[in-house]
């Protein structure tokens, strides 16, 4: 199976100059295959968000290479990184980042608006279909403030899918939800993975949710280690 993303020797250091230089990622080699549903786990401060930000082209590594859908990002400028991000990547965050001044429907259409500066009739139909798929048709024109936490996160999940990404990066998407809503959000991501083949990498602190993934990628002190639960290491399944 083709890799949707490959990282080689990724290092990230903060500081330098007057403040002490601290390296938080120490040479990450990782390949995510098309269609994988993977968890990223590890203790607080181990570098999960930093790694996700680098994979999301939101932060540049200090060294190492990142290839997305066969395209190297080496030497890419901001415009190319933005283009690659909107073409291939979707994002889900713990605090969903929905905009209260806009309806659920408008929030779902936001990535397309951001990428193209306008929204077509087809985009609107797609956004409505996505909301229908997650049982939120009746809430399409409401503000996120009128929705429950679980409903808000479902809006955020379909917003991440709006631009048909190949890889969705989710940073603790269930961290702010009750147990049932968290399980429902995970089940929804799993269903989308199975039906649409979208690859997911999900940061979670919940071992039970991580266990439902095909693969666990574990980060400790800025290095990938074999998962104690599955014995699976940083390589994708053969
Ligand atoms: N902008 C920054 N400047 C300096 N240090 C940073 C910066 N961002 C992160 N760090 C440090 O990098 C390390 C890894 O942080 P990161 O947020 O990636 O960990 P994490 O595994 O996601 O933690 P958590 O599970 O608590 O969210 C931490 O020691 C953090 O203090």
Image (cartoon, rainbow, N blue to C red):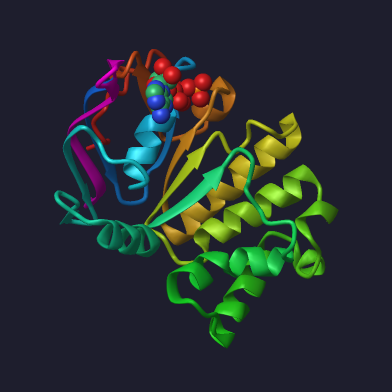
Residue 14 in which image quadrant: top left
The structure residue drawn at horizontal position 55% and vertical position 84%, both measured from the top left corner, is 122
Residue 199, position in %: x, y? 39, 49
> Is there any visible trace of residue 10 in the rendered image?
yes
Q: Which residues are magenta?
A: 1-23
Quarter occupied by the C terminus:
top left
Relative to 53, residue 158 above or below: below
> 184 or 155: which is nearer to us?
155
Relative to 205, residue 88 above or below: below
Relative to 104, residue 199 above or below: above
Residue lying furthest right: 146
Displayed-image quarter of ligand 1: top left
The structure residue drawn at horizontal position 49% and vertical position 50%, both measured from the top left corner, is 91
Residue 125 in which image quadrant: bottom right
Q: Is residue 95 left or right of residue 45?
A: right
Assess whether residue 2 is covered by the magenta stretch: yes
Q: Is residue 137 left or right of residue 201?
A: right
Q: Main secondary structure of the magenta part?
A: strand
Assess whether residue 64 is covered by the magenta stretch: no
The structure residue drawn at horizontal position 52% and vertical position 32%, both measured from the top left corner, is 212
> Is there any visible trace of residue 47 in the rendered image?
no
> 189 or 205: which is nearer to us?
205
Residue 57, position in %: x, y? 33, 47
Residue 232, position in %: x, y? 31, 23
Q: Is residue 202 left or right of residue 3?
A: right
């Amino acid at each position: 199976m083709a890799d949707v993303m490959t990282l080689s020797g990724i290092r990230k250091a903060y500081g330098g100059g007057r403040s002490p230089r601290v390296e938080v990622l120490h040479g990450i080699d990782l390949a995510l295959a098309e269609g994988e549903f993977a968890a990223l786990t590890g203790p607080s401060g181990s570098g999960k968000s930093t790694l996700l930000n680098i994979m999301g082209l939101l932060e540049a590594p200090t060294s190492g290479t990142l290839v997305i859908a066969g395209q190297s990002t080496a030497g890419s400028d901001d415009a190319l990184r933005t283009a690659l991000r909107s073409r291939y990547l979707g994002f889900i965050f713990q605090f969903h980042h929905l905009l209260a001044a806009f309806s659920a429907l408008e929030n779902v259409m936001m990535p397309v608006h951001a990428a193209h500066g306008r929204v077509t009739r087809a985009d609107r139909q797609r956004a409505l279909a996505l909301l229908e798929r997650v049982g939120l048709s009746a809430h399409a024109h409401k503000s996120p403030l009128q929705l429950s936490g679980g409903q808000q996160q479902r809006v955020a999940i379909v917003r991440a899918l709006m631009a048909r990404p190949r890889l969705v990066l989710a940073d603790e998407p269930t961290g702010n939800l009750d147990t049932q809503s968290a399980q429902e959000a995970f089940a929804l991501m799993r269903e989308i993975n199975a039906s649409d083949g979208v690859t997911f990498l999900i940061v979670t602190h919940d071992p039970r949710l991580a266990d439902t993934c095909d693969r666990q990628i574990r980060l400790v002190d800025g290095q990938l280690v074999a998962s104690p639960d599955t014995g699976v290491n940083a390589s994708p399944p053969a």
